[in-house]
Image (cartoon, rainbow, N blue to C red):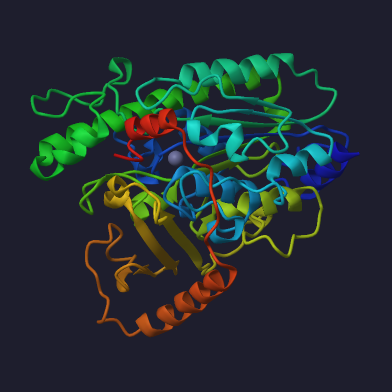
Amino acid sequence: MAAAAVFALFATAGCGRGSGPSASDEINVLLVVIDTAGAEHMGYELPDLGHTPNIDRLARDGVLFTRAYSPAPWTQPAVASLFTSRMPSRHGVLRLFDVLDEEHTTMAEWFEERGFRTAGVISHMLLESRYGYAQGFESWDATPVGGHDAITSHAVTDRAIRWLDRHDRSAPFFLFVHYFDPHFAYWHHPEFRLTGDYRGPVRPGMGIWELREARERLGPEDLRYLVALYREEIAYTDHHIGRLLDHLRRRQLDGETLVIVTADHGEEFMRHGWIGHTRTLYDELLRVPFVMRLPGGPEGRVVETPVSLLDVLPTLMALAGEPADPAAEGRSLLPWLGAKAPAPAARELRAEVSFASRPEDPAALSQKTAFKTAWLRPDLKLIHDLVEDRFELYDRSTDPEELRDLSGAHPAEAELRAALLAWERTREARGVERPGLQPSPEELERLRALGYLR
Ligand SMILES: [Zn+2]
């Protein structure tokens, strides 16, 4: 019944080519998340590099959302928001060791209730099942988790392919595949060479804290090399995503599978004085790749209306013909998957980070402590640092890199502040303090190596 319900809807979603699936077709969902992949580093935004041909092809075959945003600048809150369509302060995963509560109905639970076979293949220790992300997944394969200095995309794809080969097609599937390689450490991949000749202090695989300690001394050549290494990791990941998509084709599943490729957040390379993520709410961290290919759906559509990771679950619900969940904080993107795209809309989004701010956190965390909220209008962005009670305002049309703070000098600031502060009051009313897991000494050591702690 579930598959029929989902696909009755897919058939009426306004399929552009007129060859959409019939109500009896089974439609599967493949959701790919690349950890730490900023939209500005994707091949379709850097055509001279062409280093992500597989994702670029998927965009040409489907719908590319060029202004897609994560509500948080690091893995745990972002993935929890993707899975629940709730902002971090609603689902409660705000800080290291917070657990996604059983009370939330996750995307996988929603699929499971509708008869889908559900599986996840992950490669990040912070998504291991004890943090609550495996809710609703029949199979949660964490075998590829290898830590910051392991290269895992090949293994992630192998494990996903292995699961697909065991899938017997008696029911549709929801497969979540998480890639980790672009996350530091940044390794050189000679077969996807973007680095060129370089002699300097940056080395492939360099420890994140060593890199951060050297950051003020890095010149433009060093940063170019560092970014090239990072993009080689994205290229390598794209290659293995390509293998997964090829496998879908070989198994003749691609015509009956909705494919979504996105990221949990991006990465910063000294544009705002830091290397990595978790500390700020600039677009280099929040703007993520977002591509959807729906069988029989539109091809080559580019959507500039702002969208959010929060929108994925409402979109799937709408595709299944189910009413919108009033508690969901995202919106269905179904109109953009129909025959005729709607006119661009002025969507407003929010973002937040509360990182490492518990009083019992080791003092060593202080460099990464961040308590910030942001209000994103298509033309302007207001960021509020809650620790320093300081605001920053950026004109997104003339200053997309957010380098010229207009706070105190823009006529629209009062309106944005009012919106942001009203939302902050609802956050405070709910309370953001929750007990988290107590990390073991080994866990602290692993997190140190990953750059979360020092
Ligand atoms: Zn992440």
Q: In which quadrant of the rendered image does the C terminus lie?
A: top left
Can residue 300 be seen from the camera position used here?
no
Q: Residue 153 in the image: x percent, y percent?
A: 46, 22
Identify whether 264 is placed above or below 408.
above
Q: Is residue 255 left or right of residue 97?
A: right
Q: Residue at x 42, y 65 (%)?
A: 373
Q: In which quadrant of the rendered image does the N terminus lie?
A: top right
Q: Is residue 315 left or right of residue 169?
A: left
Q: Is residue 115 left or right of residue 43?
A: right
Identify whether 160 is placed above or below 299.
above
Identify whether 43 is placed above or below 321.
above
Q: Residue 230 in the image: x percent, y percent?
A: 30, 32
- Ligand 1's quadrant is top left
Q: Residue at x 86, y 44 (%)?
A: 5
Q: Residue 56 in the image: x percent, y percent?
A: 46, 35
**Of 311 and 132, the residue lying toward us:** 132
Q: Residue 150 in the image: x percent, y percent?
A: 39, 20
Q: How many marks?
A: 0
**Of 361 and 24, the residue lying toward us:** 361
Can residue 292 be seen from the camera position used here?
yes
**Of 345 and 178, the residue lying toward us:** 178
Farthest residue in the right direction? 1
**Of 444 and 407, the residue lying toward us:** 444
